[in-house]
Amino acid sequence: MIYTQENTICSISTKKGEGAIAIIRISGNKTINICHKIFKSKKIKNLKDYKSNKVYFGKIKKNDIVIDEVLLSYFKAPKSYTGEDVIEISCHGSEFIQNSIIQLLIQNGCKLAQRGEFTFRAFVNGKLDLSQAEAVASLISSKNEKSHNLAMKQMRGGYSEQIKSLRQRLIKFGALIELELDFSTEDVEFANREELLELISLMKNKINPLINSFKYGNAIKNGIPIAIVGPPNSGKSTLLNKIINEERAIVSNIKGTTRDVIEETFTIEGFQFRFIDTAGLRETNDKIEKIGIKKTHQKIEEAAIIIYVIDINDFNYEQIHENILSFSKKKIEYILLANKIDISTKKVYIKNFHNEVIYCSILNNEGLDQIQSRILQKIKKWENINNDLVITNQRHYEALINTLDSIEAVNRAISSNISGELLAIDIKEALQYLGEITGEITNEHLLDSIFKDFCIGK
């Protein structure tokens, strides 16, 4: 993907198809000249009449033929989304009208925008850093209130300002270390090692919470994964069907009916959840069922919460204890459902896990409200995290992991009194990784991988 700022670009910025209104966006140094050729308004006679942040009513014409009556909004550089002259044309949503206007713009000198080219220009022109540009894509794709809120905060700066500040402080030390190398024969020390250690400690204290926030941020962005697990015939598939109010999973009294994972999304109080019905946990010689059980264990590893369903009339306490101990070691939140209390002949209580047990009849809707409340209770613990400083992007997460490794290497180098030359290499690595997050250090491959997933009109 090759971008050039020499061209004036245009595209349809609203969703493809027919609607009441569509918006066509134009950006570049020839924006006014090109639009003036096709836009006719009583209030605008020449190019000087266009005033920034104003909306004009007029007609789009091809020669003497009126294509549509439109509203034209003008944003003068640099006070626009891209930092260039931008015009947005609000026209009627007919596909014929939209395509006709685009064709007119191209005939008069515009180039059709590539994916993410408007946001790319905003990045190049300093309107957004790279992490904010990525937040724009997250905002567009957000499907629930919580992911929308996170994307909005990150688009406004979020943690990028903190990253930039840490990087600038580390740059100063890197420069002093480089200066020492220039005077290596004179045995001088310009960079105070104690102060550098203090900065490294500060960076670790700032970066570690960001790294730890990724599990929360990624779950909010992509949907919080909840794995429904347990022995065969305990009520897992019935629970999924009840949650989404749809007969999505096959329910049968034959053990081993569910042989693959079934996944459905559902929104509760602004959180999007991915409920995953899994194959029953048991020993089996069935090859297909074994594959399903293997997938169950994979989904357990990926889950933010596990709903562990058992039949209160038929369960193995040792197996429950072993599984829950495994969840706890992996720091996975869990809820234990003791199901089928409606057919229980006597009251049975599961010792040791009483605080996490919900006694219910999924079939008869008994206890379902408790399940939802318990899920929200566990998830809302995460809201204690400063939402301005939450990582939702895999690329940022990996860059911070690498940064932490590099500054740990700097720490070891100082403690071992290693030469300034090796110390400088580790500092440069840390600066590289931090710079990749905000876009202070980029390459064509990185930019291409980021902007290729944008829509055309953004």
Image: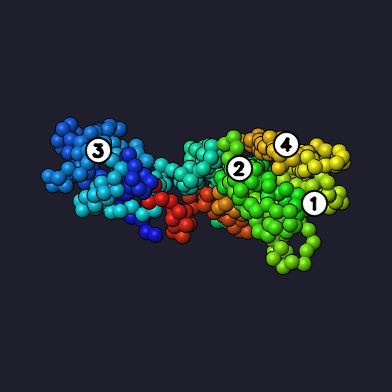
Q: Provide the residue designation for mark 3.
A: 70
Residue 291 picture location, percent across and down: 69, 64
Asked if residue 168 shows in the view, the reply is yes
Q: Nearer the viewer, residue 62 or 289?
A: 289
Q: Provide the residue designation for mark 1.
A: 323
Question: How far is mark 4 from mark 2, CA to CA?
Answer: 15 Å
Label 2 vs label 1, nearer the camera: 2
* Residue at x 21% of width, y 50% of height: 104
Element marked by disc 4 = loop
Tell me which numbered mark, 3 or 4, is placed earlier along the sequence. Answer: 3
Tell me which numbered mark, 4 or 2, is placed earlier along the sequence. Answer: 2
- Mark 1 touching mark 4, by CB under 8 A? no
Q: Provide the residue designation for mark 2.
A: 245
Q: Nearer the viewer, residue 125 or 68?
A: 68
Label 3 vs label 4, nearer the camera: 4
Direction from residue 28 to residue 210 in the image, left or right: right
The quadrant in which residue 3 appears is bottom left
* Residue at x 30% of width, y 32% of height: 53
Question: How far is mark 1 from mark 4, CA to CA?
Answer: 23 Å
Question: How far is mark 2 from mark 3, CA to CA?
Answer: 44 Å
Q: Provide the residue designation for mark 4.
A: 367
Where 191 falls versus 150 (above or below)? below
Local crowd size for mark 4, using a 10 Å CA cut-off: few (<14), some (14–19), many (≥20): some
Question: How far is mark 3 from mark 1, CA to CA?
Answer: 64 Å
Element marked by disc 1 = helix
Tell me which numbered mark, 1 or 4, is placed earlier along the sequence. Answer: 1
Residue 160 picture location, percent across and down: 53, 42
Direction from residue 61 to residue 220 in the image, left or right: right
Element marked by disc 2 = loop
Tell me which numbered mark, 3 or 1, is placed earlier along the sequence. Answer: 3
Residue 347 picture location, percent across and down: 86, 38
User: What is the three-letter code of the residue carrying label 1?
Assistant: Asn
